Amino acid sequence: MSDSTFHPFRAVPRTGVIFVSEEAAKRGFRPGDTTWSNLGQGQPESGPLDGAPDRPSALPLLADDFEYAPVGGLRALREAVANLYNTIYRPNARSKYTAENVAIAGGGRVALTRVLSAVGQVNVGHFLPDYTAYEELLDVFRAFHPTPIMLEPKAQYVFGATELEREIMGRGLGAVLLSNPCNPTGRVIAGPALADYVRVSRETGCALITDEFYGNYIYSDDGATRTVSAAEFVDDVDRDPVVILNGLTKCWRFPGWRVSWVVGPRQLIEAVNSAGSFLDGGGARPLQRAAIELVSPDRFLRETEVVQRVFGAKRTLVLEALATMGVSVEAPPQGTFYVWASLASLPAPLSDGMELFRRLLQRNVIVIPGEFFDVNPGKRRNRRRFQNYVRISFGPARAEVERGLSALADLIREHR
């Protein structure tokens, strides 16, 4: 069959995680292979953790589980998600979320696809660096115009509300998309800073689309258990243009379940559900039903406490190891399970993220080159950014992280 057969179709690029996984697979990598260390993975270790709630071991099926679920999700799950946000973030708020403020989707990217498909002909701001999958999602819907906002390493990737308002007013932004905590830098917008973001959104009418999938991976200097959500600072759940995305993937460590949600004003949720009716048709009924128990506030807090203890220890391990190797971390992660590592001080060719990735593959270690986080919809910009960075994940179990760090140290030592 000739290539001309496929002329109606464009070449669709792979996200960073998929690219590195497929390149590793060519060299024999398979998930679960203990001869490999996957420091590129975008999922947390999903097995039992000491002190965490028990993991489900069976999934009972009811008669109606063989039928479609509603496009917007099972009402009982929508109510449970609304209760979670009201209990954790809005216990004293006058305005409360209800089931009508929640849409259930089959995974985070499906939820975000629904939201972006509902965005009109406006400029949509997005930060650099940020989550790799945003690139295609910001390009595939041609109704709006993606507008990059550059974060500065010298400012430790901090971007204040005053700067945000200037971008909104100067560039005429109708919406801003961001991950918080940020993938890959681990930057967290919380407390008064996040309150100001929500205030600016409210006062300008610019929608704040906040991806909070890492919202319980927060590392506090005082060891206190904290989580982050823009929901805490919303005045009116049906009027403030704040849209929140989260799900079971990261905060509950259930990546394989593909259960996510969108929380926001009723009018927006109606549009999101309308989009779901032609985009994906809705999530799996049995998994939604099983998720109702999982999103209880008590279980969420118990899981969060353990996650922060276990992943906080792995964070310390990675940061200390990189320091001994001479790898710079301009801003130690306040959240997520990633370290955004600068290679600028390493000898060539290891100072190039793609080259370091290739050489680590030969040692059965996977990282993600920083250039994948240069969110560049439509490849409109030709400059190659972040080529001197890699994202290192401490999502895997500690032993796997240690193996990968040891191999990285050996590689650097051989080139010094």
Image (cartoon, rainbow, N blue to C red):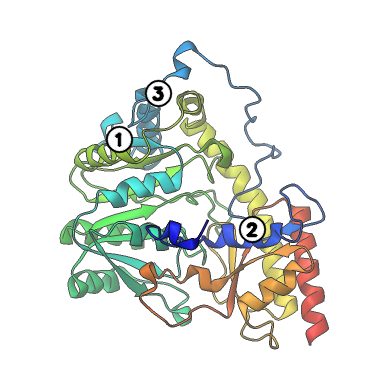
Q: Mark 3 — residue?
A: 68
Judge whether 68 appears above or below 91 on screen. Answer: above
Can I make out residue 40 in this image?
no
Quadrant hosting residue 199:
bottom left
Quadrant hosting residue 145:
bottom left
Residue 215 or residue 268, whichever sits in front: 268
Q: Earlier in the sequence, mark 3 or mark 1?
A: 3
Single out the residue that lies furthest toward the front.
Answer: 1
Q: Residues within 10 Å of mark 2 (few under 14, many from 20)?
A: some
Please state if 5 lies on the left or on the right of 404 as rendered.
left
Badge 2 amino acid: Glu
Q: Residue at x 38, y 44 (%)?
A: 111
Please state if 392 lies on the left or on the right of 264 as rendered.
right
Residue 162 or residue 363, whichever sits in front: 363
Where residue 9 sits in the image (x, y, percent)? Answer: 40, 58
Where residue 201 sits in the image (x, y, percent)? Answer: 23, 58
Where residue 351 sits in the image (x, y, percent)? Answer: 65, 83
Label 1: element kind: helix
Label 3: element kind: loop
Where residue 183 sits in the image (x, y, percent)? Answer: 50, 61
Residues under labels 3 and 2: Cα distance? 33 Å
Q: Mark 2 — residue?
A: 22
Residues under labels 2 and 1: Cα distance? 32 Å
Please state if 60 lies on the left or on the right of 292 as rendered.
right
Pointers 3 and 1 in contact (CB under 8 A)? no
Q: Mark 1 — residue?
A: 277
Quadrant hosting residue 383:
bottom left
Q: Quadrant of the C terminus?
A: bottom right
Please state if 32 lies on the left or on the right of 166 as rendered.
right
